[in-house]
Image (cartoon, rainbow, N blue to C red):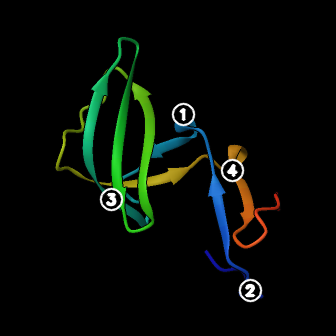
């Protein structure tokens, strides 16, 4: 991600703060769905790399599904990609 000043940034977040959102521009393909009882972990391969989401047990995605991903804004942690210093 680049800001107006062309600084490269990265986001780090916990699996429970990422959500599947079909209208999101960040796209990927589900590679693994792992039910663990009350939660299901979903691994998604994206152009930015592989990410893991924690969803509820009733999730209906399956390996091979194309999905959109979003970050819950209140839980986003932005870092400078070069220095790894936290920005927000």
Secondary element under disc 1, as helix, strand or loop, is: helix
- Most distant residue in the bottom direction: 5
Image quadrant of residue 66? Answer: bottom left
Marks 2 and 1, how far apart in space?
Answer: 29 Å
Residues marked 4 and 2 touching at CB (< 8 Å): no
Q: How many marks?
A: 4
Question: What is the crowding at mark 4: few (fewer than 14 residues within 10 Å), some, or many (at least 20)?
Answer: some
Lower sequence index among marks 2 and 3: 2
Residues marked 2 and 3 touching at CB (< 8 Å): no
Secondary element under disc 2, as helix, strand or loop, is: loop
Marks 3 and 4, how far apart in space?
Answer: 19 Å
Residue for badge 3: 28
* Percent of width and height locating residue 86: 81, 58
Residue for badge 2: 4
Residue for badge 4: 76
Q: Residue at x 17, y 50 (%)?
A: 64
Marks 2 and 3, how far apart in space?
Answer: 26 Å
Q: Residue at x 39, y 59 (%)?
A: 23
Secondary element under disc 3, as helix, strand or loop, is: strand
74 shown above or below 36:
below
Question: What is the crowding at mark 3: few (fewer than 14 residues within 10 Å), some, or many (at least 20)?
Answer: many
Question: What is the crowding at mark 1: few (fewer than 14 residues within 10 Å), some, or many (at least 20)?
Answer: some
Residue for badge 1: 16
Lower sequence index among marks 4 and 2: 2
């Amino acid at each position: 991600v680049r800001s107006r000043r062309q600084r490269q940034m990265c986001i780090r977040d916990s699996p429970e703060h990422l959500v599947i959102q079909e209208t999101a521009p960040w796209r990927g393909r589900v590679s693994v769905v792992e039910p663990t009882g009350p939660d299901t972990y979903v691994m998604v391969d994206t152009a930015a790399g592989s990410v893991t989401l924690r969803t509820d047990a009733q999730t209906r995605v399956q390996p091979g599904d194309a999905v959109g991903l979003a970050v819950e804004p209140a839980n986003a942690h932005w870092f400078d990609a070069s220095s790894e210093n936290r920005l927000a």
